[in-house]
């Protein structure tokens, strides 16, 4: 997968400038499959000469989201992709710098359409985007606006793919510095790794498993690891890899479930720190001495499973603040307001008075239960049907009495005829809070093909 990107900025230096607009077109090598566009509030003034060039002024970005507010969407759309841009260093370094200011390390393999164009279309007088588009008769609307330039770069990239696919693959693989890898690294496996969804495994010279990962494009993600030798941890891992293995799942849900289980059971060396820091905070519920259900986000306890997990206390509290507003919950009862007396929401008439006992515990607790109800599965027992490893196959996940049993595969023509049949298809895995989080997330976002309650005997 590729993400063709263009940005507009307040200046040419990523150390002092900021992004004012971003456009991203996600491409599968044949067509655009997703896109993202947004103005960005740079939180600094836009110089007049930039406004004359781009047409973007301070008034246009005044109410636009700041970078931290669009960061999540950028991470999601670019995940497991090769970053493509015209003069790629400019766009990539600006975005990387913005993420660095948020304390987030963002790394992607990247290619430059300027360099690719010189190889695909040699002998042209200029390879600037404007002149190149004119020479190749590529439409370029809204010049020096992110969407217009990104659209033109996407068409240019498609021309390169059609005319120069083999050389592009070679170009990408040449970016791997094999001298930085283990001398016994098995290069032959690189030709065999598929561009499929699944789980990949890295082994060292003693055949010890040192890392497990998941990707929607195994080949792209493995290549990214092998190229990324800049950080100390990435360099140490790349240097230790001798053998790469993989398992295709087809379904992203199945890949995440398999990855989670493999890391927990096999404890690879380079996954341990990552696993400890992934979800360190949980949401806990308890009855206070007045009979009200109180909610609290805190660091994970060893003696109790949380209702759900969060990567940070801030993320968890943001969720609770949203619940307080949506369900009129009491900030005091959510441990968000630590002063005595009525909470802030009570003063603005958005809390019905649980904090001062004006609302009964029974009435208040009903709203709390409604707020947290989405954290549980909508059915106690059900089968999830999703993509398989091939077009003729389906993936099957089984949950019984709220417990994840495991997953397996079935031929599409056979389908799943009953709960008993589904349980015969699967390999059994451990149920834990991480698997519940993974499954709940996919159900919430409706990123599965089908859900069949156990009571249903419906054939696919």
Image (spheres, rainbow, N blue to C red):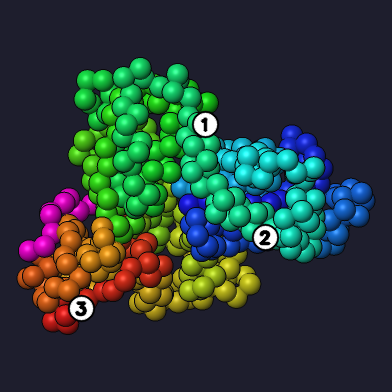
| Closer to viewer: mark 3 or mark 2 | 2
* Label 3 residue SS: loop
Tell me: 276 left or right of 351.
left
Decide which of tag 1 and tag 3 comes sooner along the chain.
Answer: 1
Quadrant location of the C terminus in the rendered image: bottom left
Identify the residue shown where x is 81% and y is 46%.
10
Q: Secondary structure at mark 1?
A: loop
User: Of the residues under marks 2 and 1, which one precedes in the sequence?
Assistant: 2
CA gap between label 2 and label 1 equals 26 Å
Image location of residue 227, percent across then percent down: 48, 31
Please say whether residue 77 is one of the residues in the magenta stretch: no
The residue segment tinted magenta is 424-437
Q: Is residue 319 left or right of residue 43?
A: left
Residue for badge 1: 175
**Does 320 sit above or below residue 226?**
below
Residue 460's disc is 3
Residue 355 place in picture, x, y as percent: 49, 67
Q: Which residue is mark 2?
A: 151
Q: Residue 419 placed where, x, y %?
A: 11, 72
Of residue 299 and residue 160, the one placed in the foreground of this image is: 160
Q: Is residue 431 magenta?
A: yes
Q: Residues within 10 Å of mark 2 (few under 14, many from 20)?
A: many
Residue drawn at (7%, 71%) of the image: 420
């Amino acid at each position: 997968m590729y993400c063709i990107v263009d940005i507009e900025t307040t200046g040419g230096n990523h150390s002092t400038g900021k992004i004012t607009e971003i456009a991203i077109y996600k491409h599968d090598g044949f067509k655009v499959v997703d896109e993202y566009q947004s103005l960005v509030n740079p939180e600094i003034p836009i110089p007049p000469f930039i406004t004359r060039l781009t047409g973007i002024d301070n008034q246009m970005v005044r109410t636009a989201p700041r970078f931290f507010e669009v960061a999540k969407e950028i991470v999601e759309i670019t995940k497991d992709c090769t970053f493509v841009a015209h003069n790629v260093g400019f766009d990539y370094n600006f975005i990387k710098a913005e993420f660095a200011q948020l304390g987030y390390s963002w790394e992607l393999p990247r290619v430059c359409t300027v360099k690719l164009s010189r190889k695909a279309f040699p002998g042209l007088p200029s390879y600037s985007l404007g002149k190149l588009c004119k020479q190749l008769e590529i439409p370029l609307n809204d010049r020096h606006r992110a969407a217009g330039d990104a659209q033109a770069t996407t068409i240019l990239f498609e021309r390169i793919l059609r005319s120069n696919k083999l050389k592009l693959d070679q170009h990408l693989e040449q970016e791997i510095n094999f001298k930085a890898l283990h001398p016994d690294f098995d290069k032959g496996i690189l030709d065999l790794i598929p561009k499929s969804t699944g789980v990949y495994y890295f082994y060292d010279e003693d055949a010890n498993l040192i890392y497990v990962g998941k990707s929607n494009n195994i080949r792209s993600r493995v290549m990214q690891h092998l190229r990324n030798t800049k950080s100390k941890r990435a360099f140490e891992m790349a240097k230790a890899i001798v053998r790469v293995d993989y398992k295709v799942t087809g379904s992203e849900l199945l890949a995440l479930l398999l990855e989670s289980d493999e890391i927990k059971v096999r404890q690879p060396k380079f996954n341990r720190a990552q696993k400890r820091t992934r979800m360190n905070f949980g949401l806990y519920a308890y009855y206070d001495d007045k009979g009200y259900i109180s909610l609290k986000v805190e660091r994970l306890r060893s003696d109790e499973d949380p209702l759900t997990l969060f990567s940070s206390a801030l993320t968890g509290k943001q969720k609770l603040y949203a619940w307080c507003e949506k369900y009129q919950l009491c900030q005091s009862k959510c441990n968000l307001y630590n002063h005595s007396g009525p909470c802030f929401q009570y003063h603005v008439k958005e809390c019905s008075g649980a904090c001062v006992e004006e609302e009964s515990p029974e009435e208040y607790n009903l709203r709390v239960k409604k707020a947290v109800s989405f954290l549980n599965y909508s059915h106690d027992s059900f089968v999830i049907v999703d993509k398989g490893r091939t077009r003729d196959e389906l993936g099957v996940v089984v949950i019984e009495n709220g417990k994840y049993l495991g997953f397996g595969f079935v031929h599409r023509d056979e389908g799943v005829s009953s709960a008993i049949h589904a349980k015969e298809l699967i390999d059994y895995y451990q149920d834990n809070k991480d698997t519940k989080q993974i499954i709940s997330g996919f159900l919430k976002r409706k990123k599965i093909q089908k859900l069949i309650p156990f009571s249903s005997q419906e054939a696919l």
